[in-house]
Structure formats: structure tokens, C-alpha cells
Amino acid sequence: MASARRSCRNNPDVFCYICGEYTLSGDRKNITGFVKRAYMAYFKVKLGDQDKSWAPHKVCKT
């Protein structure tokens, strides 16, 4: 059985995974090293898989 590649129907960058809100394009910024460290400090989970297309690469500005 051949495995089919899975792909997301929706762009993962339209949702902020930190605050849990959908964001407009003007309200997004790239994930920086500071954001990764803050995410780890608050959630105790590493923000990883940044090399994957399905992972979020943006967060909201708020």
C-alpha cells in the first residue's frame, strides 16, 4: 500500500497557536528566538518542527 503525503488544507500561519486566535496578515510576525524561549518558559514545551511546512511560522503581534 503506497502512502499518500498528507497536507493541510489551511495555512497554519493564519492561527496564532500562543493566544489561540485567528489573525489577519497585518497582525502577524515571524517566530523569533525570543518567542521560542518565551514559549518554552510559559508552556514548558519546545516550539519545534520549524523546518516543516505544516508547522506555524508566524504568531500574532499582541
Image: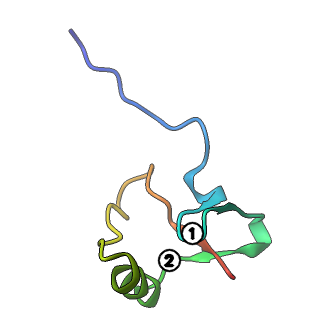
Q: Quadrant of the N terminus?
A: top left
Q: Secondary structure at mark 1?
A: strand
Location of residue 19 in the rendering, given as x and y in whole percent from the top left corner: 60, 70
Q: Secondary structure at mark 2?
A: loop
Q: Which mark is residue 31?
A: 2
Vertical arrangement, residue 44 with respect to residue 51, above or below: below
Q: Name the residue beneath numbered marker 1.
A: 58
Q: Earlier in the sequence, mark 2 or mark 1?
A: 2
Q: Which mark is residue 45?
A: none
Residue shown at the point (30%, 71%) measured from the top left: 45
Residue shown at the point (61%, 63%) measured from the top left: 20
Residue 11 falls left or right of residue 62: left
Q: Quadrant of residue 13?
A: bottom right
Q: Callout 1: 10 Å neighbours few (<14), some, many (20+)?
A: many
Q: Quadrant of residue 46?
A: bottom left
Q: Callout 2: 10 Å neighbours few (<14), some, many (20+)?
A: some
Q: Does the residue at mark 2 contact the one at mark 1 (Cβ under 8 Å)? A: yes
What amino acid is found at the position of numbered circle 2 in the picture? Ile
Location of residue 62 in the rendering, given as x and y in whole percent from the top left corner: 69, 82
Spatial separation of the CA atoms under disc 2 and disc 1: 5 Å
* Towards the viewer: 4 or 42: 42
What amino acid is found at the position of numbered circle 1 in the picture? Lys
In this view, the residue farthest toward the top is 1
The number of numbered discs placed on residues in the rendered structure image is 2
